Image: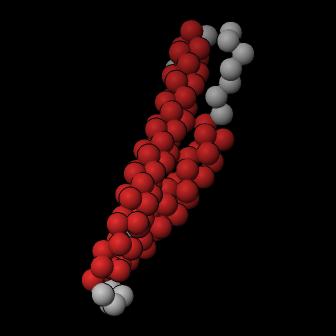
Amino acid sequence: MSGYRAEPERLRALARQFEDVAEDLGDAARLTDGVAAGDLGPPGIAAALDGLIRPWSGSLAAAHAEFAGAAAGILTAAKSYEDTDDDAVRALRRADGGP
């Protein structure tokens, strides 16, 4: 035994936290995308603000995608651990003469 123990419910709780962070990052990315498109006076001001904010918006969107992907991977792992446990229980029951 490796000493490691997988707890699918704790993995699902972690995935929910990742999903919450991903949602917040997605909201922030949407709020900052195109924020300088409004009437800010001379065109140079809007362009300068857009140049400042656009990289942040892109980084927020990328972080959103990473956290959402991590959450999906964690959920997949939780399901795999449960499926493996279920398969092991069935195999042990069959080995003991059960159905």
User: Left of 1 or right of it: where is 19?
Assistant: left
Q: Residue 23 vs residue 54: left or right?
A: right
**Could you say where residue 51 lies in the image, as x and y percent from the top left?**
35, 66
Residue 79 in picture, x, y percent from top left: 50, 36
Can you say which quadrant of the picture contains the N terminus?
Answer: top right
Q: Which of 33 and 53 is in front in this view?
A: 53
Q: Can residue 75 be seen in this view?
A: yes
Instruction: Specify the quadrant of the image occupied by residue 12.
Output: top right
Q: Is residue 88 above or below residue 66?
A: above
Determine whether 49 is above or below 59 in the image.
below
Q: Which residue lies furthest to the left in this view?
A: 43
**In the foreground, 48 or 88:** 48
Residue at screen point 40% across, 51% down: 62
Left or right: residue 20 compared with residue 28: right
Number of marks in picture: 0
Residue 34 in sight: no
Coordinates of residue 41 in the picture (x, y in percent): 34, 90
The residue sitting at 35% across, 80% down in the picture is: 45
- Tell me, what colour scheme is on the image? secondary structure
Residue closest to the eye, 27 or 99: 27
**Is residue 33 shown left or right of residue 43?**
right
Q: Which residue is drawn at 72% across and 16% down?
A: 3
Q: In which quarter of the image is residue 61?
A: bottom left
Q: Which residue is drawn at 52% across and 24% down?
A: 84
Place residue 47 in its image quadrant: bottom left
Q: Point out residue 30 in the picture as x, y percentages from the top left corner.
A: 39, 69
* Towards the viewer: 42 or 83: 42
The correct choice, above or below, for 8 with respect to 24 in the image is above
